[in-house]
Image (cartoon, coloured by chain):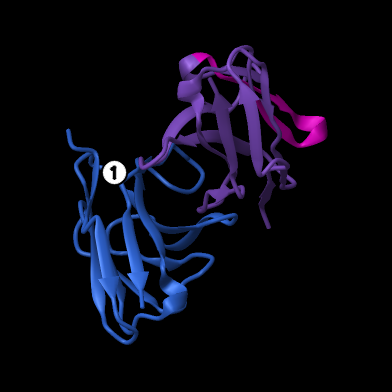
């Protein structure tokens, strides 16, 4: 099993450009998450999908959109990138969210720089 | 709302020293607690977790953590650290019935050989 995979690993954008970060998991998990990691701020939740067909905002959703394409895939889109979105982005998945909580498994991350 | 506080931002130890990293959370009800580790250039991996039962939980690589409900704490310990423990450590909490895991700010641990 590959676990959680993310593409690309690195990306440099200019302000105003758009891009989509891809995430896929092969563990048949119901819930998927997108986080950003910034120095001294830990991980902050951008969006999550508790189950296929649903998405919800996390702590820092502004400037992002998501699509839960199917049970395996959860993409994150930056429509008009800004320097404040320079960060490392992690995708994660878990068997279930909510009351029946299980640990989250993380992907390798995407390091994004916006100039 | 849930919140997690990790008191130490950067800890520097010598090999064989004992380690304790602090984690306090804020939540009024039942919680599940986690410690994750991120080695340089790698993704987060689960070290250990507490759901219920014995408040002293043991994880991988000799780490353990103790849940003290009265103090809202879940401190991470290791009796004797190794150079390979150099990493960033994150405490995380989710309240029962909540949808979102909340992470602390992280503690960077540097072990000098």
Vertical placement of residue A98 versus B54, above or below: below
The crowding category of the residue bearing disc 1, from other C-alpha atoms within 10 Å (few below 14, some 14 to 19, many at least 20), is many
Q: Is residue B105 left or right of residue A62?
A: right
Q: Is residue A75 left or right of residue A92?
A: left
Residue A13 x %, y %: 28, 76
| Residue at (24% x, 38% y) in the render | A3
Question: In the picture, residue B9 is in which quadrant?
Answer: top right
- Residue B72 relative to residue B9: left or right: right
In-front residue for pair B79/B45: B79
Which residue position is annotated with label 1? A29
Taking B6 as reference, is A75 above or below it? below
Magenta-colored stretch includes residue B73: yes
Q: B50 or A106, which lies in front? A: A106
Q: Can residue B106 be seen from the camera position used here?
A: yes
Residue furthest bottom as drawn = A16
Q: Residue furthest front?
A: B113
Residue name at image x 54 percent, y 65 percent: A59
Quarter of the rendering containing residue A10? bottom left
Name which residue lies at 34% across and 84% down: A15
Please provide the residue range marked out in magenta: B62-76
Element under disc 1 = loop
Chain coloured purple in the rendered structure: B
Which quarter of the rendering shows the N terminus of chain A?
A: top left
Q: Is residue B50 visible?
A: no
Q: Residue at horizontal 62%, vertical 19%?
A: B53
Residue sitting farthest toward the right: B70
Residue A70: within the magenta? no
Give left or right: position of B59 versus A85.
right
Q: Which of the image's four quarters has the C terminus of chain A?
A: bottom left
| Prevailing secondary structure class for the magenta stretch in the rendered image | strand
Chain letter of the residue beneath label 1 in the structure image: A
Which color has been applied to chain A in this rendered view? Answer: blue
């Amino acid at each position: 099993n590959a676990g959680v995979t993310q593409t690309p690993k690195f990306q440099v954008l200019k302000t105003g450009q758009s891009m989509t970060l891809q995430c896929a998991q092969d563990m048949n998990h119901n819930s998927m998450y997108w986080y950003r990691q910034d120095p001294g701020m830990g991980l902050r939740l951008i969006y999550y999908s508790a189950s296929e067909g649903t998405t919800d905002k996390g702590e820092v959703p502004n400037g992002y959109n998501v699509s839960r394409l199917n049970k395996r895939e959860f993409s994150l889109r930056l429509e008009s990138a800004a320097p404040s979105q320079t960060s490392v982005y992690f995708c994660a998945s878990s068997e279930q969210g909510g009351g029946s909580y299980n640990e989250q498994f993380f992907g390798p991350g995407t390091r994004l720089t916006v100039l | 709302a849930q919140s997690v506080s990790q008191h130490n931002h950067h800890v520097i130890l010598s090999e064989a020293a004992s380690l304790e990293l602090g984690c306090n959370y804020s939540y009024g009800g039942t919680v599940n607690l986690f410690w994750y580790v991120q080695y340089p250039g790698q993704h987060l991996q689960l070290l250990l977790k507490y759901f219920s039962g014995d408040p002293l939980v043991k994880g991988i690589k000799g780490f353990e953590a103790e849940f003290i409900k009265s103090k809202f704490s879940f401190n991470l310990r290791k009796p004797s650290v190794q150079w390979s423990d150099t990493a960033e450590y994150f405490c995380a909490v989710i309240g029962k019935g909540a949808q979102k895991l909340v992470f602390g700010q992280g503690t960077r641990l540097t072990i000098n050989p």
